[in-house]
Image (cartoon, helix red, strand yellow):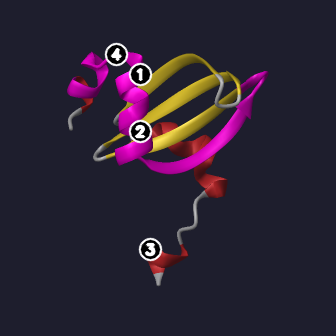
Amino acid sequence: MKLSEFKQLPQKAQIDVLYNQGTYVGKRRAGSMIIVLYQVEDFYVEIYYREYRRHISRINCFLSTCFLDPYLDQMNVELLVS
């Protein structure tokens, strides 16, 4: 699936894709929001929750790895360098 195809889906279908095809990367807190990051093929998706896994405030999609900085401390890269 391409990013453009993902963006065309209704929100419920996007969530289904993330839960069924996405790879969980990490989560973080920003103020009162919990942000959960998934990777789907060659793009990333952040889900902004007002209440964890209850009320979705927004979904942010991106291709660039520069937006991964807030999650780097959660990623285990040992397997990549050994």
Direction bottom: furthest residue: 82
In-image side of 22 versus 9 (left or right): right
Q: Residue at x 35, y 25 (%)?
A: 13
For label 4, the residue is 10
For badge 1, the amino acid type reads: Lys
Instruction: Measure how far apart labels 4 and 3 are at the Cα level.
Output: 35 Å
Q: Residue 18 has which mark? A: 2
- Contact, mark 4 vs mark 3 (Cβ under 8 Å): no
Instruction: Measure how far apart labels 2 and 3 are at the Cα level.
Output: 24 Å
The crowd level at tag 2 (other Cα within 10 Å; few <14, some 14-19, many 20+) is many
Instruction: Measure how far apart labels 4 and 2 are at the Cα level.
Output: 13 Å
Mark 2 or mark 3, whichever is nearer to me: 2
The crowd level at tag 3 (other Cα within 10 Å; few <14, some 14-19, many 20+) is few
Who comes first in sequence, dot 2 or dot 3?
A: 2
Q: Residue at x 48, y 77 (%)?
A: 79
> Relative to residue 80, is residue 73 depicted above or below?
above
Element marked by disc 4: loop
Q: Residue at x 64, y 42 (%)?
A: 27
48 in the magenta segment: no
- Contact, mark 2 vs mark 3 (Cβ under 8 Å): no
Mark 1 or mark 2, whichever is nearer to me: 1
Q: Residue 12 has which mark? A: 1
For label 3, the residue is 80
Question: Which region is colored magenta?
Answer: 5-33
Tell me residue 33's x, y (percent). Answer: 71, 24
Who comes first in sequence, dot 1 or dot 2?
A: 1
The N terminus sits in image quarter:
top left
Who comes first in sequence, dot 1 or dot 3?
A: 1
Instruction: Measure how far apart labels 1 and 3 are at the Cα level.
Output: 34 Å
Who comes first in sequence, dot 4 or dot 2?
A: 4
> Relative to residue 63, is residue 6 depicted above or below?
above
